[in-house]
Image (cartoon, coloured by chain):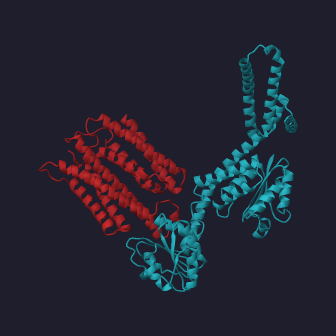
Amino acid sequence: MVELLFWPALLAYGEAAVAYAGDARRPGSMGRLATWGVRIGWLVQTALLVAQAARAAAFPWDTWAGSLNLFVWLVVGAYLIWGCKPRFRLLGLVVMPLAALLLAISYAAGGVAGSGRSGYSTLFLVGHVGFVLAGFAGLTLAAALALLYLWQERELKRRSPTVLRFRAPSLVTLESLFGRTVAYSLPVLTLGMAAGFARLRHGSQLDPLIVLTVLTWAVFGAFLVLRFGAGWHGRRAAYTTLAGFAFVVALQLSLHMGHFA
Amino acid sequence: MSLVLVGTSHRLSPVEERERVAFDLAGAAALARGLALEGEAVCLSTCNRTELYLVDPDPEAAEARASKALLGEEVELYRMTDEAAALHLFRVAAGLDSLVPGEGEILGQVRDAFEAGARGPVLDRLFREALRVGKKVRTETAINESPASVSSAAAALAQQVFGDLSGCRVLLVGAGEVSELAARALAARGATIAAVTSRTQANAEKLADAFDARAVPFAGLGSELEHADVVVSSTSSAEPILSREQVPDRKGRPLFVIDLAVPRDVDPAVAELEDCYLYDIDDLQAVVRESLSGRRREAERAEAIVEHEAERFRDWQASLRVVPAIASLRERAESIRSGELAKAEGRLEGLSESERRTVESITTQIVNKLLHVPIVRLKQAAAAEGSGYVEVAKDLFGLPDDENADSRRKSRK
């Protein structure tokens, strides 16, 4: 059953990625195909996660590959909130190939098949893993928006004749969106971290993953202070968001080191 | 009934010829009524074209009337009929025959001409379809999305920076026609023209009045820059009037500077400032060129839509040709049915009212079911093969010619 749901989800995400590329070349019906690919893929992946949860005796996404599966679902879900509007289709060109790739990696690493056995309670893992991954998903989306901002800003600065060919959101909209996305995502990440710290056994050592998470939190915390307190805007704000996202990538890559072991 | 189009456009005639056959809306309406006689007529007259669409049983006579009305001996005209005429109108409504592909004004002009014309079933359907096709092309392609002039390109670029322009404050430096055009394009997208400055204060005041803005002295340019989001500059100054040093710290707020002057008013170093976007006339013209080539690319997609819709219209028009034959066929069948019932009246006397209604209903249903397939086939064949099939049906069922059938129907009424 789970196998049957994985392939349609991957296919729909892949179709969305290809259709977004087609839409960037020639806006029109390809964009609508892409949007439907995202919607259908996300619904099928939701069914996949439900099937996994129903089959598992405990929290099914406590492995690196499993958490990647959940992470993809959260990123696409966050993108779906407003990303399907025609003006944001270029964002889909950033998000959907990444989603399709990560889902395929998750499958190859066994993230769709089942879960490892963790010594932690399901409630704790739902709170900790769920919130941390939701926070990361939001920060990933913020990074995609910042990337789109930098591209758009460069095109305008270079006075490229093709600047109006791609229907991207305005600079002001993108800047406001990636700032707000970080502002919403950081408290969610904080909740997840708090759940983790609360469960940290007395005398246990801080593993590198915890240190990286704290660093990520610090970078995005500094971003919010500078953005809303000191009036940081434009390229500097976008680069800071991307720097924070580099920590998110590092975190995702190092999760397989056995954080829940 | 045939559809006839006679007209001229910017593709065929120079303005000296076109202006001789140009009509205002009232004149176009009067001409259409005069030409319609017992048929239908619409006159579409814009600065780029004057076209007469006529529906008449005698297409040659209709064409002669239209040619005479458009000074056919002095002005070069094109003439089209039926499917070609429909395709042409669909292309016109879609903006594919316009100077700037996809321009939106033509759709309103087609609607006005249609509403003022002497309409009947064919032109009603034709123009409604044309308006629908025009909208469809603009919805399903990006033909009208990119700017086609320097001022609209400037406004579109400002939108690319700020998004919604409502709340954006525009400072006009120079009060000439170029500034005014750019200001109108920005105001049309919601921007507020906040201040106008010019070396000649009277000109600044005149333009400021037009936009309900403030006229400020030229010396106050630096302080006005602090409040502006968009600056449009088009003075005749030989030296730059806006240097990098004059631009105050934006504190993260973008500044979009449009330099429409030659020689340029704005020091190119202004573009190096963070959050500052400077476009001169060459940059804007490059954007317009690119967007026009984009419109032409989209026009290829639009042509396919228009051709498909013209085919649909042709099918509908062809189905009209079988209407008299179908009406005769139904009439004949009904007369046979009612005649046979009348003959059997003596044998049906004993039936109750409800039983009579049942007999009526059953015989009507039998006739309808027998006729259903031949009628559907007739309509399909008319669209695919022309009128040959209709003639065969008339011969097979012994139906009268269309004129005889019409006169018989009228005399019965």
Residue B166's spot in the image, x, y percent? Answer: 49, 66
Residue A73 can be seen, yes or no: yes
Colour seen for chain B: cyan
Query: Left of B135 or right of it: where is B343?
Result: right
Query: The C terminus of chain B appears in which quarter of the rendering?
Result: top right
Q: In this view of the protein, which residue sits in the foreground, B26 or A20?
A: B26
> Which residue sits at x=31%, y=34%?
A55
Residue B153 can be seen, yes or no: no
Quarter of the image for residue A141 reads: bottom left
Chain assigned red = A
Residue B136's spot in the image, x, y percent? Answer: 62, 51
Q: How many marks?
A: 0
> Which residue sits at x=40%, y=51%?
A79
Quarter of the image for residue B364 reads: top right
Vertical position of residue B381 compared to residue B127: above or below: above
Residue B175's spot in the image, x, y percent? Answer: 57, 80
Query: Left of B393 or right of it: where is B100?
Result: left
Residue B122's spot in the image, x, y percent? Answer: 75, 47
Vertical position of residue A238 compared to residue B62: above or below: below
Query: Left of B264 or right of it: where is A116?
Result: left
Vertical position of residue A79 compared to residue A240: above or below: above
